[in-house]
Amino acid sequence: MPQVEGPAPVESAIPDGMGPVADMAGIMVGDVPAWLVLGEDGVLSRWAPGRSVFQRLTAIPPAESGSDKIRRRLHASLCGRFAAVVDDYGTTGTVIDLSTGRTTMTLDGGDYCEHVVPFALAFAEHDGSPVLIHRTRWNRLDVSDPATGRLLTERETPERRNHEDEPPHYLDYFHGALYLSPDGNQICDDGWIWQPFGMPTVWSLTAWLDDNVWESEDGPSRAEYPFLEEWDRGIAWVTSNRIAVQDVGDREHPPCIRVLDPTAAGPSPYVTSMAMLTVTTFPGPGGRYFSDGNLLLVSGETELEAWNIEQGIKTYTVPRFTPIRQHPHSLELVEINTDAMRRWVPPGRTR
C-alpha cells in the first residue's frame, strides 16, 4: 500500500496561554483559513498557525453537569463571526457573536434520549447570510438567525397522544449529528428510530427555507436510508451526491462502508419518505470520516486512510496521523496533542 503522496503533516506548537484544547472549528479570516479553538477552560481563541496569529476572544459558561458522557463541541460559521458551543449527549448550548463577544442565543435541545446523540447543530448559509440549524426537541429541528435568535422555521409541533394515528407532519425520529453537503444545500441527519435503528436522512435546506416549513419532517426532498444497526459512527459527505456511512453489520451481514446517493431515491416499504439508494458497499474501517472532495478519508486508531468509494479500494495511507477535525474551506486535517497541532493538506490542495 503506497503511503501519502505529497507533504507530510506539519507540526505547529500550541501558543503560550492557549492551554489544553477541547475542540476546534475551521473559519475564514478574510481570505485566510484559520481555526477557532475552544479551550478546556472555556476560553475561545482564534488561531492561524501558518501565520503565527493567536488571539483570545471570549469565554463561555462551564459544561452541563450530570453525565460523564457529555462533551463540549465547538461549531463555527464559515465567515468566522458566529460560534456555537454545545453539550454533545446533553441538552444545552450557547451561540456567540465573536465580533462583540455577546451571547445571541441560549439553546435547549430537549431532554428525551438526548444522551445517545451529539447535539444536532450546524451552521449554513442562505441568501448570502449565515443561518443556524439546531435541535429544539428530540424530533424537531429549527433554523434561526444567529445574529438575533429570530426563528426562521415557525410552525406548530404536532403532538401524538397515546395510540392515536399520527397527525400530519408528525415526525417519529430522533435527530442526531448534522452534516452539510459540500454545495451547502443539503442536510444529512445522523438520527435514529425505534427499535433502535440508525437512519441517515437528507433534505434540502433551500426547499426548507424558501418553499416548505415542514421540509425537515416530510417534505418532497426528504430521503432516508433504512436500516443501520447503529448511529453516531463514521459518516461524511464525499461529494454532494455521495455519502459514506460506516455500517457495523449484524449476525447476517459483515461490517462495511456503505456509499449512499441522496439524489437517487425511490419508494420503500420500510420508510415514510423516499429511500436513498446504495451505490457501493465494501469492507472498510470505522473511525472519523472526512473527504478531500473525491476520496473518503478515514482517521483510525493509528493512521489516516484514503479510499476510492467507487472502486472500494484503499489508495494510500498517512502513517501515525489521526486527525480529529477538518477545515471546511482548505480541507486541512488537524491532530491535537498536549503541546502541538499537526496539520496535513490532501494532495492537490494548498493551505
Image (cartoon, rainbow, N blue to C red):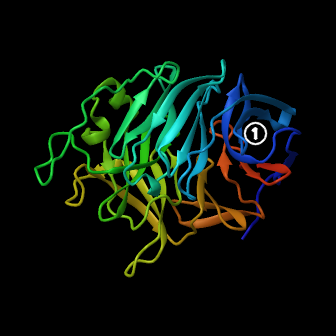
> Which residue is under mark 1?
350
Total labels: the figure holds: 1
The foreground one among 228 and 120 is 120
As drawn, is 164 to the left or to the right of 308?
left
Q: Does residue 331 sit above or below 193 in this rendering?
A: above
x, y percentage for residue 344? Answer: 76, 49
Quadrant into which the C terminus falls: top right
Q: Can residue 72 be seen from the camera position used here?
A: yes
Q: Residue at 72% across / 68% down in the picture?
A: 302
The foreground one among 18 and 1 is 18
x, y percentage for residue 300? Answer: 65, 65
Q: Does residue 183 sit above or below 294 in this rendering?
A: above
**Helix, strand or loop for disc 1:** loop
In the picture as drawn, the residue positioned furthest to the front comes out as 66
Q: Residue at 25% across / 39% down in the picture?
A: 220
Quadrant into which the N terminus falls: bottom right
Q: Few, some or many C-alpha atoms within 10 Å of disc 1 (few <14, some 14-19, many ≥20)?
A: few
The foreground one among 238 and 235 is 235
Report the amino acid beneath label 1: Thr
Q: Can residue 295 be seen from the camera position used here?
A: no
In the picture as drawn, the residue positioned furthest to the left comes out as 164
Q: Residue at 51% across / 20% down in the picture?
A: 129
As drawn, is 46 to the left or to the right of 198?
right
Residue 74: image quadrant is: top right
Residue 84: image quadrant is: top right
x, y percentage for residue 180? Answer: 49, 40
